[in-house]
Structure formats: structure tokens, C-alpha cells
Amino acid sequence: MQPKIVYPRPASEIAPRIRQVFVRDLVLPCRIGAYRHERSAPQRVRINVNLAVLESDAPIDDQLANVVSYEKIIEGVRRVAQTGHINLVETLAERVAALSLSDPRVRSVRVRVEKLDVFPDAGSVGVEIERHSAFG
């Protein structure tokens, strides 16, 4: 008896199709910082957001409603950054990640938050996090 040859399915049939949606170098004033001197005025922060978005089998049909909108991402990040004083860049990053993952099409998000004016000899300081959806 001849052994049966089994060919693997193409990766395109197994793996979901992912689209990367991103916001680069969004600079906003933010009341942020754990130290007393950081509470007196907003500081500039730069925020980068990368979303891995599950593509639907349905056609996009050139309709904004059928995609994750980077305009909505920016609007949400602005709201999060303006909700009052935040002590840590980590907290701001977590809030942006949670907002991004509230859309069920988003499978993962990478958020980088940088404070731009902390040290005169450093371009920025901050944190980058990556979070994944409970949906997959």
C-alpha cells in the first residue's frame, strides 16, 4: 500500500488576513507626570499607535464605515490624553491600548508614548506596550 501524500494547505487559507492601521507621531499637550513640578502645566507627548486589524471577507466597497478609521483613533487618543492628570506614561499607553481594543476587529495594538521635553540631552523618554485582543 502506498503512503498517502498530504499537502499542507496554503497559509492564505489558514491564517487570517491582517491589515496594519497606524498613527505616527501624534504630538499632544497632556497633563502627565508623577512629580510635583509636572503638575503645573501640560507637557508635550508623542504617541504612536499600530493596530493589527482583522480583514473581513466582505468587500470594503470604498466605504469608510467598512474599515478601522485612523481619524477615529486620533479622536479617541485626544480624548484619553485630555481626561485630567495622569501620573505615568504607562497608564496613558494602557488607556490608549484599551480604547483601541474596544473595536472587535482589532486583534492587537502597539502603543508608544514619549514625553518630549523631560531631559535636554534626550530626544524623548517613554514606554512602548503591545496588547492583544481576547477575541483572537
Image (cartoon, rainbow, N blue to C red):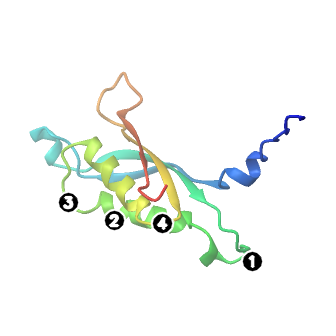
- The alpha-carbon separation of the residues under discs 3 and 1 comes to 39 Å
> Within 10 angstroms of label 3, few (less than 14), some, or many (20 or more) residues?
few
> From mark 2 to mark 4, how far is it between C-alphas?
20 Å
Q: Quadrant of the N terminus?
A: top right
Q: Amino acid at mark 4?
A: Pro
Q: Which residue is mark 1?
A: 61
Find residue 116 and name its label. Answer: none
Seen from the viewer's position, the closer of residues 126 and 50 is: 50
Measured Cα–Cα span from mark 1 to mark 4: 20 Å
Question: Which amino acid, by three-letter code, is at mark 1?
Answer: Asp
Residue 48 visible in the shown view: no
From the image, tell me which residue sits under label 4: 104
Determine the residue positioned at 49% across, 68% down.
Answer: 72
In the image, which disc is placed on residue 79? 2
Q: Earlier in the sequence, mark 3 or mark 2?
A: 2
Whether 114 is drawn above or below 104: the answer is above
From the viewer's perspective, is the residue at label 1 or at label 2 nearer?
1
| Front-lying residue, 81 or 40 | 81
Q: CA distance from mark 3 to mark 2?
A: 10 Å
User: Element type at marker 1?
Assistant: loop
Q: Earlier in the sequence, mark 1 or mark 4?
A: 1
Q: Secondary structure at mark 2?
A: helix
Q: Disc 1 vs disc 2: Cβ atoms closer than 8 Å? A: no
Q: What's the amino acid at mark 2? A: Arg
> What's the amino acid at mark 3?
Gly
Residue 76, position as x, y percentages in the image: 40, 65
Mark 3 sits on what residue?
84
Name the spot of residue 97 as percent of width and height, x first.
Answer: 38, 53
45 to 96, vertically: above or below: above
Q: Nearer the viewer, mark 1 or mark 4?
A: 4
Image spot of residue 12 (x, y percent): 75, 51
Vertical position of residue 102 compared to residue 133: above or below: below
